[in-house]
Image (cartoon, rainbow, N blue to C red):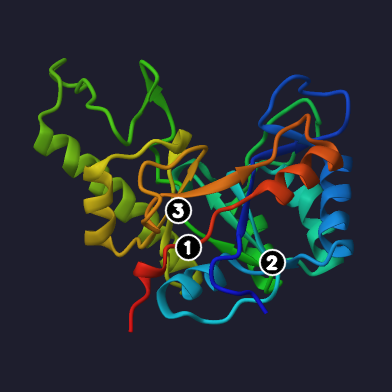
Amino acid sequence: MHQAGEPIVILMYHHFTERGYWRNNDAVVYIDDFAAQMDYLRKEGYNVVPLQRIWDYSRKGTPLPYRPVAITFDDGYESNYTLAYPILKKYSFPFTLFPVAGWLLEENPPHAYDPAKGDLLDWRQIDEMVASGLCDVQSHTFDLHDKVDGRSLLVTPLVKADTGQMETPEEMRNRIKSDLQMAKETIENRYGRPVYALAFPYGQYDAQVMEIMDELGYGFGLCMGRSQHQDSMKAVIRLGVVQGDGVEGFARHLQRWSWTPPQGNRQQ
């Protein structure tokens, strides 16, 4: 049984490919490394749990098993389905997808698998994974996964296409809120399950985003690297797994990981 104060790991992956492709791209993990990493989790006694279990632990103190780990995938790459999903099924490991909802088609046109490409999932593939009971779907925005001058569209004002003028603070807030609401409703309407988590594109967020999360019912925010709000479940750091980690680096990161949910978030 997990004890208060012991670390909890949330793994973050993006895209997968076969060895020899997408070299020197940290966001792309070789699928044989992923398979070995999942095998390591099983053999070393880690317990892979749904992300919802960590959310429930932080809010209500719902017990977790010893050495809890959650697995998350950002952006919605088709390789999550074609390459990673069979491995997760082998181990019966639950996982959470964070697709950019507005990018996905109902069904992709027929195409051959190409390890050199970064094709996106379609909703039919996600439906199949959700139906397995292993997959949960949460939000990575509806269509705000891009940057302007290095700043995520979630945290920076944009120039309006119709006038060429910079949007006002009110217009920016309305744009962000509308997008996050659309992402939430799209996923909830399809699967009938609450969307409680938002993975920030590029890990960027600000106080306004946190306010909007409160208004829309997002209680769990996930970022990358350092968090400016380590006492909040609205900006939780994840362990990003990158191409060069292999099994040795993966094991090292797990052993050094120290994040634990802030106890103050629990609701009685």
Q: Which mark is residue 139?
A: 3
Q: Is residue 21 visible?
A: yes
Q: Kindly identify the residue that appears in the image at 28 percent across and 39 percent down.
A: 206
Q: Is residue 247 left or right of residue 26?
A: right
Q: Secondary structure at mark 2?
A: loop
Q: Position of residue 59 (x, y in %)?
A: 41, 74
Image quadrant where residue 66 sits: bottom right
Q: Position of residue 135 (x, y in %)?
A: 64, 65
Q: Is residue 7 left or right of residue 226?
A: right
Could you tell me how far apart the alpha carbons at marks 2 and 1 are, in whole angstroms?
20 Å
100 or 3: nearer the eye? 3
Could you tell me how far apart the alpha carbons at marks 1 and 3 are, in whole angstroms?
20 Å
Which residue is the site of mark 1? 261
The residue carrying pointer 2 sits among few (fewer than 14), some (14 to 19) or many (20 or more) residues within 10 Å by Cα, namely: many
Q: Position of residue 156 (x, y in %)?
A: 27, 28
Please state which amino acid type lies under the numbered disc 1. Answer: Pro
Q: Quadrant of the N terminus?
A: bottom right
Q: Mark 1 or mark 3: which comes first in sequence?
A: 3
Cβ–Cβ under 8 Å for marks 3 and 2: no
Please state which amino acid type lies under the numbered disc 2. Answer: Pro
The residue carrying pointer 3 sits among few (fewer than 14), some (14 to 19) or many (20 or more) residues within 10 Å by Cα, namely: many
Which residue is the site of mark 2? 94
Eye-nearest disc, 3 or 2: 2
Q: Secondary structure at mark 1?
A: loop
Please state which amino acid type lies under the numbered disc 3. Answer: Ser
Image quadrant where residue 13 sits: top right
Q: Position of residue 6 (x, y in %)?
A: 60, 65
Q: Mark 3 or mark 2: which comes first in sequence?
A: 2
Q: Kindly identify the residue that appears in the image at 62 percent across and 68 percent down.
A: 50
